[in-house]
Image: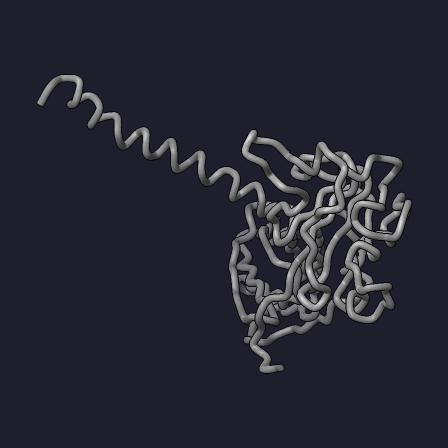
Amino acid sequence: MTIKASRWLKQTPIVLVAIGAILLVPLSAYAQTDQGRIVGTVRDQNGALVPGASVVVKNDRTGEERAVTANGEGVYILPALRASQYTITVSAPNFAVTTITGVQLAVGQEQKLDVTVSPTGVSESIDVIAGASEAAIDTGSARMGATVDQREVVGLPLNGRQLSQLYLQAPGSVNSGAGTFGDIRFSGRAVNQNIVRFDGVEGSAIIDASPGNLNGEIAGPFRLQSSLENVQEFRVDSNNFPAEYGTGTGGQISVVTKSGSNRFHG
């Protein structure tokens, strides 16, 4: 074996690790735009912090569970959650188990949920029902926009059942034509600056071989469209959207498609 071949074999694992890291970066970036998170602080009845508390989140539709541990300041973060209804269970030594049901998380929302636990000498459970008003307030961002939930997607009358007509619920949106995706402007910006994502994957335009964003540069009616029957809910941000929303300066539309559940239906 030559010296040159020997050096190449030694460097091969490093090269493979570097390539793998590069390939994983876009995947993690895409996932941030359509997923929300629940954050909060665990305290006792006197307002003192409860470090090391166990926080378990359960998706009521699919039964999927995830668990995290609150840090030394009693703060917990549950990231990368799909839009759904959740049940939060908090437990800590010498405290009663506290369960919060009916926590509604919208697409791309940061839900702030502080939990108060009670001391106990015997095993008991405290159930708290989350109010609908709590889920509607997004205190984790300064963005301006609107969340269109499943009830509105199904119930609102639309001409031709075009999903784009529901974008008009966002502040700063203007219909400059028939209400299709290419006719709606946000805050006076060009329609070609609008970006739509389906489950975190961009579907705004055709990508040609140059490479380039063909319909982002040339006016055209093509946009990836989804049937309303396949849409669970979506979020439209028209101004002050977070840094992870890039590519265009117009409206940022994040669509979440329907997923399975534990309930049989047809």
Residue 222 vertical placement versus 57 (above, below): above
Residue situated in front as seen by the camera: 118 or 106: 106
Q: Is residue 83 visible?
A: yes
List x then y, in percent, for residue 154.
Answer: 78, 70
Q: Image point 71% across, 42% down: which residue?
A: 195
* Quarter assignment of residue 160: bottom right
- On the picture, is 77 further left or further right than 140? left
Query: Residue at (68%, 39%) from the top-left corner?
Result: 245
Q: How many marks?
A: 0
Q: Nearer the viewer, residue 2 or 30?
A: 2
**Which image quarter holds the C terminus?**
bottom right
Q: Nearer the viewer, residue 238 or 133?
A: 238
What residue is at 66 percent from the left and 48 percent from the top? 197
Q: Nearer the viewer, residue 260 or 250?
A: 250
- In the picture as drawn, the residue positioned furthest to the top comes out as 3
Colour mapping = one colour
Occupied quadrant, residue 262: bottom right
Relative to residue 145, is residue 257 drawn left or right? left
Relative image position of residue 54 (x, y in whole percent): 53, 59
Which residue shows up at 56% across the image and 72% down it? 121
Q: With respect to residue 214, does 118 lie above or below?
A: below
225 on left or right of 165: left
Q: Position of residue 198 (x, y in %)?
A: 64, 53
Q: Is residue 118 visible?
A: no
Q: Quadrant of residue 157?
A: bottom right
Give the quarter of the figure containing the N terminus.
Answer: top left
